[in-house]
Image: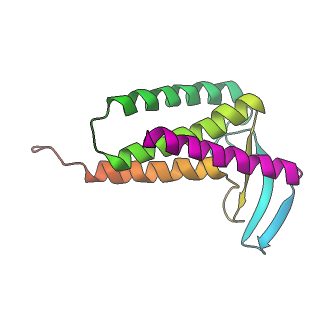
Amino acid sequence: MYFYLLALTVLAIDQISKYFVVLLMSPNQSIPLIENIFHLTYVQNYGAAFGILAHRRGLFVIVSLAVVVLILIYHRSLPDGHPYLRTALALQLGGALGNNVFDRLRLGYVIDFFDFQVWPVFNVADMAIVVGIGLLIIEVARMPREKGN
């Protein structure tokens, strides 16, 4: 239950934050919160990370749906335990649903808005995916090694 609740929480926070960005800002508008350090900048991202493969909506949706299905299947096959792995998968699921399923299917692009001026603009779903990947790396690093390998 925790897995699904976390994924839905990520999805909800992601979509609500994007709703308010669209409601209160114009595309490409930037509001400095900490001058030259952190801005809210409304970007319509038609590509993947860093805007690569722009306007490949179908590809992103298909790959994301496949990832969603694989996460759900893998999660169901996990034995008890593995809290980092379960959390990592839930974060990645919520992020994939928010960015590539909801945004791309509904709008054709992803809404980004966190802007640290030295990194591409990103959103809540992006953060969830990155934290999920970090937890996945931690979990893999903690796994016992087989003797002889």
106 up-or-down from 114: above or below: above
Residue 21 part of the magenta-drawn span: yes
Residue 6 part of the magenta-drawn span: yes
Of residues 141 and 54, the one drawn nearer to the viewer in this rendering: 141
19 up-or-down from 72: above or below: below
Q: Where residue 65 sits: x, y (%)?
A: 57, 26
Range of residues picked out in magenta: 1-26
The C terminus lies in quadrant = top left
The structure residue drawn at horizontal position 70% and vertical position 39%, both measured from the top left corner, is 47
Residue lying at the far bottom in this picture: please name it: 35
37 up-or-down from 135: above or below: below
The structure residue drawn at horizontal position 47% and vertical position 42%, both measured from the top left corner, is 90
- Magenta span: chief secondary structure: helix
The N terminus lies in quadrant = top left
Residue 89 visible within the image = no
The structure residue drawn at horizontal position 39% and vertical position 33%, both measured from the top left corner, is 75
The structure residue drawn at horizontal position 72% and vertical position 51%, both measured from the top left corner, is 17
Q: Where residue 83 sits: x, y (%)?
A: 35, 48
108 left or right, relative to 142: right
